[in-house]
Amino acid sequence: MTHVARYLLSKYFAASVGFVLLLAFLGWMVQLLRTIDVVTAKGQGVFTLFSQSLLVVPEVISIILYLCLALGVSRGLRAMQVSKELFPIHSGIGIKPLWQSIGLFLLISIIFDATLVHQLVPKTNQLAAARADEINADLIANSSRPGQFTDIAPDLTLMIAGRADDGTGLGFFLHDARDPLKNQTTFAAQSQLSRADDTLYIKLKDGAIQYFNTKTQTMSTLEFGTYSVAVRELASSNLFAAIEPTSLELVSLVQSGALNNAPRQLALLHDRIASPLYLLSLVLLAFAMSMQPRPLRSKRRISGDVVLLGTGVLVKVLGASAKQLAGGDANLILLIYLIPILPLIPAFVIAWRNGAFSTIPADLRSVANV
C-alpha cells in the first residue's frame, strides 16, 4: 500500500471513529438514564449502574456503525476537497490509491462488524440479562423483611412472615395486580432462592395460587406442592426478551436440524450474515459521491450527508421488515440479502458517471480542455 493510500485510510478512520464515539456516548447516556432506577429504586451502587449501562454500548455501535463509517468516508474525502488534496491525487497519481484505501477500510470494518453482530452483542446481552437477574434477586432479598409488606414493583407486593436459620422464608405471600384483567395472589409455607439453567427462581413449597378475574368477578384456586417463580418476572426485567444465541450456537442448531421449524431464529442468523452488506453498500455509495474533486464554487442542492442518512435509514427499515417477514416464512430469506445491496445500484451509476473506473475523472478532463 502506498503512502497516499495509508493517508486516505487514516482520514476515513479519524472521521468514522469520531462519529462512532459521539453516537455511542449518546446511546450510553440514554441507557444510563433508563437504568437510573438501579440506584434510586433497587438500592444498587453507582458502579453497578455504570457497568450495567455500559453493556448496551456494543449493541448501539452495531446499530449505528454502517452510518458512521459512510459519513466518515464522506467527511474525510470532502475535507480533502476543501484542502485541495484530491486534485493532485486524481491528476498525478491516479485513483488507484483511492480504491486501495477504501478496499482496506471496508475489509477492516467488515471484520469488526461481523465480530460485533455474531459474538460480542449476543454475549453482552446475555451478560446484561444475567446481571439484571442478580440485581433483581438482591432486590427481592433486601425487600423480604419478615412481617413487612413491601412493594418490589408497581402493583407487586411481597411479604415473608419469618425466616429459618438457613435463610428459608416462612409464610410467603405475593400479590400481583400488574395484569389489568386479573389479580394473582400466591401463598406458600416456605420459599427459597434457587438457580436453574442460568435463571434465578423463588422455589415455593406447600401453597396455593388464587386468580381473581376482574372482568367476570370470579375467583379460582390452584394448590401446589412445589412451584417456582422466575425472579425476572417479579422485577419486570425486559432484558431477557433481547437474549439471542450467538451465531456459532445458531449454526450448531442449524446443523442439528433444530431450526427447521424455527424460521424466526433462522431469519436472525441470516440477518447477522447480511449485516456487513449494509456497511459495504452505504460506504461505497459515500465513496462514489465524494471521491471526485470538485471546485469550491460548485454547490450541491442536497447535502451528501442527508442523502446518506436518508438512504441508510430507509434501507435499514426495509431490512428490518424483510427480517420480520422471513421470520414468518423461510421462503423470503433472500430478501434479507437483497435489500442491503440496493445502495450499490446508485453507487455504481454515480461512480461510472464520475469516471471512477477510468484513469482521469470526467470533470478533470473537461477542466483540462478549458
Image (cartoon, rainbow, N blue to C red):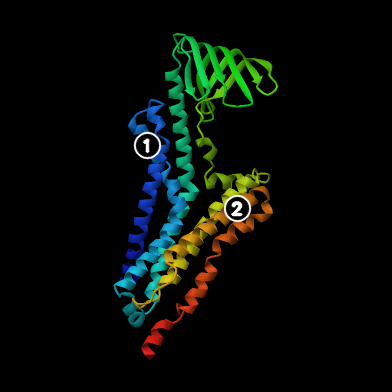
In the displayed structure, would residue 331 be above or below residue 165?
below
Q: In which quarter of the image is residue 209?
A: top right
Q: Residues within 10 Å of mark 1 (few under 14, many from 20)?
A: few
Depth order, front residue of 190/297? 297
* Residue in the foreground of this view, choosing between 295 and 271: 295
Residue that extends furthest to the bottom in the rendered view of this protein: 369
Q: Is residue 353 left or right of residue 296?
A: right
Query: Could you say where residue 347 lies in the image, as x and y percent from the top left?
Result: 50, 70
Rendered location of residue 101, percent (x, y):
38, 68
- 358 w.r.t. 121: above or below: below
The amino acid type of the residue labelled 2 equals: Ser
Q: Where is residue 270 in the image (x, y as percent from the top left)?
A: 58, 53
- Provide residue 84's location: percent of width, then percent of height: 30, 75
- Cα separation, mark 2 vs mark 1, equals 33 Å
Q: Name the residue beneath numbered marker 2.
A: 321
Q: Which residue is drawn at 34% across and 80% down?
A: 93
Q: In this view, does 255 lie to the left or right of 136?
A: right
At label 2, counting other C-alpha atoms closer than 10 Å, the crowd grade (few under 14, some 14-19, many 20 or more) is some
Give above or below for 367 relative to 199. below
Q: Can residue 115 be seen in this view?
A: no
Q: Which one is earlier in the sequence, the residue at label 2 or at label 1?
A: 1
Taking the spot 53% from the left edge, 56% from the top edge, the residue there is 316
Above or below for 335 versus 85: above
| Secondary structure of residue under mark 1 | helix
The answer to whether marks 2 and 1 mark residues whose Cβ atoms lie closer than 8 Å is: no
* Residue 176, image quadrant: top right
> Of the residues shown, which amino acid type is indicated by label 1?
Ser
- Which residue is labeled 1 in the image? 51
Q: In screen coordinates, is 268 left or right of 361?
A: right
Q: Please state the total of marks drawn on the protein image.
A: 2
Residue drawn at point x = 57 percent, y = 46 percent: 250
Label 2: state its secondary structure: helix
